[in-house]
Image: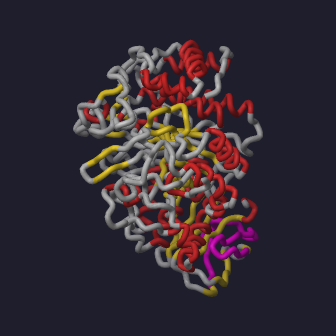
Amino acid sequence: MKPHILTINWTLLVALPLLFTCFSHAQKPITQNKAIDPFWNNTIIYFMMTDRFSNGDKSNDQVLNRKQDGALLRNFMGGDIKGITQKIEDGYFAALGVNVLWMTPLIEQVHGYWDEDWGRSYPFHGYWPKDWTKVDPNFGTEAEMKTMIDTAHAHGIRVLADVIINHTGPVTKVDTLWPADWVRTEPVCQWHNYKNNVHCAVAASIPDVQTNSEKPVKLPSFLLEKWQLEGRQEQELAELDAFFDRTQLPRAPKYYIVKWLTDWVRDYGIDGFRVDTAKHVEADIWRILKTEASLAFDQWKSKNPQALETEKDFFMIGEVMHLGVNGFKNTPAGTRKYDYGDKQIDFYDYGFDSLINMGFATHANMPMEALFSIYSEELSQGAFKNVGILNYVVSHDDPEPYDKERATPYKTALKLMLAPGAAQIYYGDELARDLIIEGTVGDATWRSFMNWQDLTKKDTQALLRHWQKLGTFRHKHLSVGAGVHEKHSEKPYIFSRKYIAKVKSDNVLVGIDLNKGRKTLSTYHTFKNGTVLKDYYSDTLVTVKDNKVKLNTNFSIVLLGKVSDN
């Protein structure tokens, strides 16, 4: 990465006291009193496996001697950064209402493969790091990543980087083990208590970074030799010297990684982090990562003031497996803390603005009203008030997706896109990409290549239009994800959402299972008489009269919001 000579300024002096308080594990966490920007509870995040989304450059399909000899869906398949850029330029994400992109890690992966009992696997997924300072050549180059981020920003879309501190990639025939003062390979996590979740390897094949250590360590010889061959050893070492001189952090493994991760923010304007395996690392490091990333983001913004129309702080969301709303699994009812069995931690107190809601795929089995009312309660006055959650129906490694047979794709879209909290579309949800691939083992079945070929089918085109209408509605109206839910009618199902703020308020009214053709709806005083509304499902304008609206559409769904908010 390019060098940065940083001088101490008043902004830094303000930030450093917070940073230094993080060193002691006995230090009490600093509670985040600032409520989350409501944007982040209404946002639509599109999550894709970089290698499985779109192949924009076939010249990088076969690199680093990686072959096509892995188990089914365990090889690299050609998706890359250029492919993502092309879809941004084509308007694919904008049509879905997407305003945030999250792709699997782009950093350089181990070069070899890992042999399991069931077959061979390559690091196509991005979660086996080898070098945190370089883009993996199968995905593209740093220049292509910059173009992708700049293009996203030009289209009003923010970009999250998927980041890892917990572990390195496995040892292979061409990838050596990191030194013992950097990683441990045992014990393997047993999940019974805090120590057996944190001071352990999540799998026998995955070396665990010694994140509990504060002892200075030297860089691995293989990494120094790699940088030397690439002609950047002197630059990387100078940057590390500047970082540790400025922060006065010890040269422990986790702090090296913090430096490497935040450089991507400073150099390229990444808007936020999605943190992998957050519960498997001592929580203190996440506050340090957030502090450093925020500083880096502010520095990038000062050099690129026109990159995005609206100003936002650096955003950080975490993956804490089995954490969810409404007392889901390891989250006791009435709290947002993760329960290790012998210790509870509120990750929101350690730099996280939002957490992935692992419970949504299970809760989506509820009727819509039960789902929506419970989530609204949790976010407006319950345990998750003033913080963020991200809902999903399918993810890359959750073994219990909602509707894995894709039997009810229209209802799935309604539940996800109209639920309180942010919505994550996993690539292909909107095209009903097949999740049951015969012959695959484990999570490979969720990781097939994007089914672009299905767009020739009328049924797939119609489903995509359904997702696009819901996405556009949410994108235009903050109250969909961040407002307070109120049911008005059970049959047909009609509800409103209201977001009230000093600067800008927003209301919407939704009807589901209505009669097709002519229909008259009460607005339940959600809007004033004379207000011009848009039905985002039929693209029809109506005016409120006598607290009612009249429509004549071919659809049983109505999505109403003020035209003035467009």
Depth check, front residue: 270 or 384 = 270
Task: Please check the rendered image and state whether residue 448 is part of the magenta-colored stretch, yes or no.
Answer: no
Q: From where the camera sits, is residue 47 visible?
A: yes
Depth check, front residue: 494 or 319 = 319
Q: From where the camera sits, is residue 387 visible?
A: no
- Quarter of the image with the C terminus is bottom right
Which x, y percent locates residue 431?
52, 68
User: Which region shows up in magenta?
Assistant: 519-542
Task: Please check the rendered image and state whether residue 527 is part of the magenta-colored stretch, yes or no.
Answer: yes
Q: Residue sitting at 43 percent across and 16 percent down? A: 218
Q: Work out whether 156 lies above or below 171.
A: below
- 139 to the left or right of 6: left
Q: Work out whether 550 lies above or below 77.
A: below
- 550 to the left or right of 386: right
Counting the numbered discs, the total is 0
Task: Please identify the quarter of the rendering in which residue 161 is found.
Answer: top right
Q: Residue sitting at 63 percent across and 31 percent down? A: 266
Depth check, front residue: 237 or 467 = 237
Which x, y percent locates residue 254?
44, 25
Which x, y percent locates residue 168?
39, 34
